[in-house]
Image: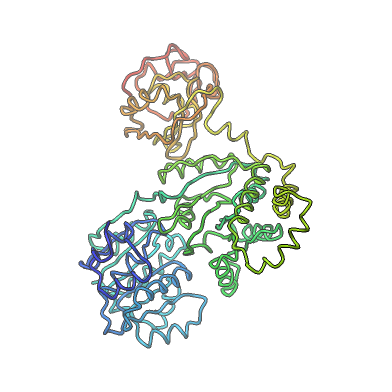
């Protein structure tokens, strides 16, 4: 096992990290620290939040810093006030044995005059949010012309928040000769463009796959009717009595509404959104950090940069539209090598988003049933019993025991235990004794096109609406490419540039072999298995015996020279459809089914 002493750090820093309890470097630290302490280089580092990125750039930065110079040598840009403050605190703890090192954190919501005074006293490191730093530059309160190292932390978040122009302006005020270190959880095109525009042959380091989620996070979803979403949230919270989590909502209004409902219903919760003043925001975060709150209800923007240890759950009250937001939300849990749970409360129409996230981050979501009232009561009872078992007994209680024991003289030991547990448990039992089933079973049965118990395999295919195909066209592509009967094809989910489809597991080899030879619009089709085989059966695709949407002759979009565009180029004139029906599969309106052969669509 690698130790920090092997990474080339100066003794003062090694002593600091030892006092902080650091035992071994994380993977991102192990790769970046030796590289950055020994070389002048540009760097692109991809790693999930909570993997120790601040130490990964902070320790080598402090290692190479010139303590004698009192002008800014390093600039660290980050998206939010909270992250800015967190980075500053971490750097100060690493530099505890380097008294000459000075840094300043500059961010909005605080007195700019205080920040200007700190800069004037002399600093080597500026940690800043883009908006406030741009303001300081325009006021000529800070000069960055001697900066040697620029660090962009959570670069994807800064771009998502619309800071691209500010970043371009700030970087234009720094020297052309400098090293730039970019740290990000995901690598969207916008982040790649920063690398291209501001770096020279950067070293690339990735811990895990690009845009992938952390491996120690369990992903799951609960499917409910939209009207039961809040009740499902409460039931999930009640079934996890020790929950310490963040609930993400889409809007400020929804965030405030859900938080108020939770508080009214007796939960330890509060909200975090853009309409709060900075003082209110700080007060909420203070309560959440010291665990006075069990649940923080937040918008994506308000929660960016939150760095809180031991979060057990991230709950997506609404699953976000973009995968990067899901990745960042989920990264609030499972920090520093710990495990965590990311769960989404969805309706049947959200299943497509779940599948997109699965494909993008390379994971599988587990479909969990919303707990029944009895299951919630059982969890609460076991939790209460465990708390009673583990409680530290105050010795002063001894003097009261004789009277207490006498008052329970008519009860057995089991009856006494029941009485004490019932003090807390009865309210849950009363609340949940007639609880309804919140699961949206109808949507679950549609999930993979299951009907008759046949195990199905689900595939991703790089063909979608942009290729001019609809669902019946996709059925046609699968059938003609593989020879699999239309009736055996399961659910099809069509997107703009890709799709998903299901076939019985016994056809896996046929599908995977024959799709290697298929071209659509003169380009090879990419096919990937996206999930484990699952129970279910196809049943035909909403159509007549000859496929499609039950149209006469089994044809696709055609009757008597309608002129409608076909999604694929016909392979030969004979099979482009005869007269009277526009049938795709054969001569004169449908004909015989052709044998499989290599295809170009």
Residue placed most toward the observer, 131 or 405 = 405
- How many numbered badges does the structure rendering display? 0
Residue placed most toward the observer, 42 or 141 = 42
- Residue 110 in percent (x, y) is at 51, 79
Residue placed most toward the observer, 20 or 200 = 20
What is the quadrant of residue 597 in the picture? top left
- Residue 552 in percent (x, y) is at 54, 17
Give the left or right position of residue 239, taking residue 207 as reference: right
Give the left or right position of residue 150, taking residue 110 as reference: left
- The residue at the point 37 percent across, 27 percent down is 569
User: From what the image shows, is residue 276 above or below residue 424?
Assistant: below
Q: Quadrant of the N terminus?
A: bottom left
- Residue 94 in percent (x, y) is at 35, 73
User: From what the image shows, is residue 571 above or below residue 192?
Assistant: above
What is the quadrant of residue 567 in the picture? top left
Q: Quadrant of the C terminus?
A: top left
Q: Please name the colour scheme applied to the rendered image.
A: rainbow
- Residue 97 in percent (x, y) is at 32, 79
User: From what the image shows, is residue 441 above or below residue 363?
Assistant: above
């Amino acid at each position: 096992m690698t130790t920090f002493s092997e990474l080339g750090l100066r003794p003062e820093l090694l002593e600091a990290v030892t006092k902080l309890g650091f035992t071994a470097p994380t993977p991102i630290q192990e790769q970046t620290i030796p590289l950055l302490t020994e070389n002048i280089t540009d760097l692109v580092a991809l790693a999930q939040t909570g993997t120790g990125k601040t130490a990964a750039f902070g320790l080598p930065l402090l290692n190479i810093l010139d303590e004698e110079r009192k002008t800014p040598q390093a600039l660290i840009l980050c998206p939010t006030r909270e992250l800015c403050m967190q980075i500053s605190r971490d750097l100060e703890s690493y530099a505890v044995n380097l008294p000459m090192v000075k840094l300043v954190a500059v961010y909005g919501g605080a007195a700019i005059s205080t920040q200007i005074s700190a800069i004037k006293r002399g600093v080597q490191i500026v940690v800043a949010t883009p908006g406030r730093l741009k303001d300081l530059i325009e006021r000529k309160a800070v000069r960055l012309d001697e900066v040697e190292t620029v660090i962009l932390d959570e670069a994807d978040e800064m771009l998502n928040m619309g800071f691209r122009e500010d970043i371009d302006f700030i970087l234009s005020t720094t020297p052309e000769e400098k090293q730039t270190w970019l740290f990000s959880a995901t690598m969207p095109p916008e982040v790649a463009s920063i690398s291209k525009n501001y770096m020279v042959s950067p070293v690339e380091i990735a811990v895990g796959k690009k845009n992938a989620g952390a491996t120690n996070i369990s992903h799951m979803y609960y499917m409910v009717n939209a009207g039961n979403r809040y009740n499902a949230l409460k039931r999930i919270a009640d079934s996890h009595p020790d929950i310490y989590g963040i609930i993400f909502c889409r809007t400020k209004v929804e965030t405030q509404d859900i938080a108020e409902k939770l508080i009214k219903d007796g939960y330890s919760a509060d909200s975090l959104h853009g309409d709060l003043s900075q003082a209110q925001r700080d007060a909420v975060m203070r309560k959440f950090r010291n665990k006075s709150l069990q649940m923080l209800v937040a918008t994506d923007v308000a929660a960016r940069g939150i760095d809180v240890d031991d979060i057990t759950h991230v709950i997506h009250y609404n699953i976000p539209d973009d995968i990067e937001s899901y990745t960042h939300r989920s990264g609030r849990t499972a920090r520093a090598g710990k495990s965590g749970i990311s769960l989404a409360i969805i309706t049947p129409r959200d299943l497509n988003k779940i599948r997109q996230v699965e494909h993008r981050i390379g994971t599988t979501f587990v479909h969990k049933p919303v707990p029944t009232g009895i299951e919630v009561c059982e969890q609460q009872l076991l939790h209460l019993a465990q708390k009673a078992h583990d409680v530290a007994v105050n010795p002063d209680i001894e003097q009261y025991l004789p009277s207490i024991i006498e008052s329970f003289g008519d009860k057995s030991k089991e009856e006494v235990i029941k009485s004490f547990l019932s003090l807390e448990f009865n309210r849950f039992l009363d609340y949940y004794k007639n609880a309804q089933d919140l699961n949206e079973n109808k949507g679950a049965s549609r999930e993979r096109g299951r009907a008759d118990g046949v195990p199905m395999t689900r595939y991703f295919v790089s063909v979608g609406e942009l290729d001019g195909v609809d669902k019946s066209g996709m059925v046609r592509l699968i059938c003609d490419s593989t020879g699999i009967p239309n009736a055996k094809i399961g659910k099809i989910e069509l997107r703009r540039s890709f799709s998903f489809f299901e076939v019985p597991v016994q056809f896996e080899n046929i599908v995977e072999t024959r799709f290697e030879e298929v071209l659509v619009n003169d380009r090879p089709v990419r096919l990937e298995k996206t999930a484990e085989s699952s129970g279910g059966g196809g049943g035909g695709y909403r159509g007549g015996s000859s496929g499609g949407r039950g149209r006469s002759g089994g044809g696709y979009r055609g009757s008597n020279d309608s002129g409608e565009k076909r999604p694929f180029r016909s392979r030969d004139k004979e099979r482009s459809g005869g007269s009277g029906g526009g049938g795709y599969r054969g001569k004169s309106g449908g004909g015989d089914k052709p044998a499989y052969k290599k295809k170009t669509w």
